[in-house]
Image (cartoon, grey):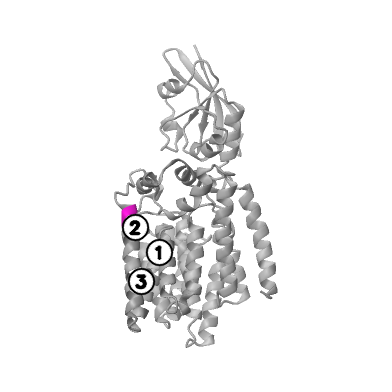
């Protein structure tokens, strides 16, 4: 590519994202996917998906590295980074956008800080979605390959499956219009097989373990929090964008149909089934990019309207460049720091009141050494509720030093019972997010 803007942008993007990726310490969901891929066989992984909440694709990608216990976490982080880098490359190479729009998309918070850094199943899904949108005009020439890519993408995550469901409907409609019965039959068969695979993976889904913040409620707070401004300004911006994009995309039936199907399904899912997190909600932005990409490929749309759409998408992308509302548990898990502290006190007893310990497990397992660790009441985030004299005492070891790991760095009051006093002495403050206390009992 001779595009200087591409080389400048991609070089800066690589330096920033690769550096952040190397410094990233996986949080619970990342570590849990690695543990599942490492410790479970194929049948057991299928059974675990109803608790994990994601499809099989990412676990299969991780399996060769996890089974051999290779280079955790860098193998996992690098694989994820490669998928996101490839998605950005496809965007620059094939998207019919101007350079400014491509720059704003590349440096938006989702594509600069979330998907290339946090190793989950989403980057591989976005990579496949971008391939499918890049092939959109030529899909009738290669319908079976297109259908196979849809099958693969749908099995990465539910939010990705929503997008390729819409693309699959468009493919079937186009094949039917052209009376291409042979390819239509093959593609419909692949889609039915895909549907069966997805149903097998979601049968018996258990969402009873969801934390309070992820239980869906009839609220638009997550919508009005789309940008960094207050609710009123965010709502005004959303209304402007809905009217603007709706008016423009309506001029192309396929892009309008795509955005309508994906947005209705995503909105319904987040409102009634799973509230989702910011990395899920960013798929509204991903699909807005895809709908605009499809729209720009329509040669019958005037350049004037395409320019209007580019301006609107530039504004949205620019607004998403700025984001300071980060989730500390995701971006500052300090899982390696915790694991190193445990290793330094390998002959001690550790008691965890936080599930963040699960993020440190792959680090600890690399040494094939057993550590004396207990967890209790890990679902609660409020230590005033979980700290109980008897529960703590029952988890202590009489012949070892005992440490308590908890999601607070506020002074913990002494506990007392039957003439005994339990004292908590701060041992390590991890960036004022998590703290480790030495637990001592006195008569």
Distance between mark 1 and mark 2 Cα atoms: 9 Å
Q: Residues within 10 Å of mark 1 (few under 14, many from 20)?
A: many
Q: Which residue position is annotated with label 1?
A: 151
Considering the whole magenta stretch, tell me its main secondary structure: helix
Q: Is residue 214 magenta?
A: no
Secondary element at tag 1: helix
Q: Is residue 69 above or below residue 246?
A: above
Q: Is residue 200 magenta?
A: yes
Q: Is residue 151 visible?
A: yes
Distance between mark 2 and mark 3 Cα atoms: 15 Å
Q: Is residue 263 left or right of residue 122?
A: left
Q: Which residue position is annotated with label 2?
A: 197
**Marked residue nearer the N-terminal end (1 or 3):** 1
Marks 1 and 2 close (CB-CB < 8 Å): yes
Residue at (35, 65) in percent of width and height: 265
Q: Is residue 324 visible?
A: no
- Which region shows up in magenta? 197-201
Q: Which residue position is annotated with label 3?
A: 187
């Amino acid at each position: 590519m001779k595009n200087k803007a591409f080389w400048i942008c991609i070089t800066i993007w690589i330096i920033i994202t690769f550096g952040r990726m190397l410094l990233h310490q996986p949080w619970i969901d990342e570590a849990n996917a690695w543990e599942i891929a490492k410790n479970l066989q194929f049948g057991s992984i299928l059974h675990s998906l109803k608790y994990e909440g994601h499809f099989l694709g990412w676990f299969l990608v991780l399996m060769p590295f996890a089974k051999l216990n290779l280079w955790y976490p860098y193998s996992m982080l690098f694989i994820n980074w490669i998928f996101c880098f490839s998605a950005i490359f496809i965007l620059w190479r094939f998207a019919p956008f101007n350079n400014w729009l491509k720059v704003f998309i590349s440096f938006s918070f989702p594509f600069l800080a979330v998907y290339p850094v946090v190793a989950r199943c989403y980057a591989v899904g976005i990579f496949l979605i971008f391939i499918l949108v890049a092939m959109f005009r030529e899909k009738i020439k290669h319908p079976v390959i297109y259908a196979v890519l849809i099958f693969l993408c749908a099995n990465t995550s539910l939010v990705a499956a929503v997008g390729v469901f819409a693309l699959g409907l468009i493919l079937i409609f186009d094949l039917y219009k052209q009376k291409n019965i042979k390819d239509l039959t093959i593609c419909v068969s692949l889609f039915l097989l895909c549907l069966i695979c997805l149903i097998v993976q979601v049968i018996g889904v258990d969402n009873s373990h969801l934390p309070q913040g992820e239980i869906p409620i009839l609220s638009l707070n997550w919508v009005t929090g789309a940008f960094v401004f207050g609710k009123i300004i965010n709502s005004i911006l959303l209304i402007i964008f809905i009217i603007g994009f709706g008016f423009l995309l309506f001029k192309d039936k396929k892009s309008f149909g795509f955005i309508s199907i994906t947005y209705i399904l995503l909105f319904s899912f987040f409102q009634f089934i799973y509230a989702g997190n910011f990395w899920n909600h960013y798929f509204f932005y991903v699909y807005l990019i895809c709908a605009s990409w499809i729209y720009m490929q329509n040669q019958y749309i005037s350049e004037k309207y395409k320019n209007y759409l580019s301006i609107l998408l530039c504004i949205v992308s620019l607004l998403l460049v700025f984001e300071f509302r980060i989730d500390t548990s995701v971006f500052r898990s300090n899982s390696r720091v915790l694991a190193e502290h445990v290793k330094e006190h390998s002959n001690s007893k550790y008691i965890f009141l936080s599930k963040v310990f699960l993020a440190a497990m792959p680090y600890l397992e690399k040494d094939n050494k057993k550590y004396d660790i207990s967890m209790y009441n890990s679902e609660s985030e409020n230590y005033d509720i979980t700290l109980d004299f008897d529960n703590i005492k029952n988890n202590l070891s009489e012949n070892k030093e005992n440490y308590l790991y908890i999601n607070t760095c506020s002074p913990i009051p002494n506990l007392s019972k039957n003439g005994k006093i339990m004292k908590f002495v701060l041992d390590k403050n991890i960036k004022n997010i998590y703290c480790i206390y030495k637990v001592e009992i006195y008569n």
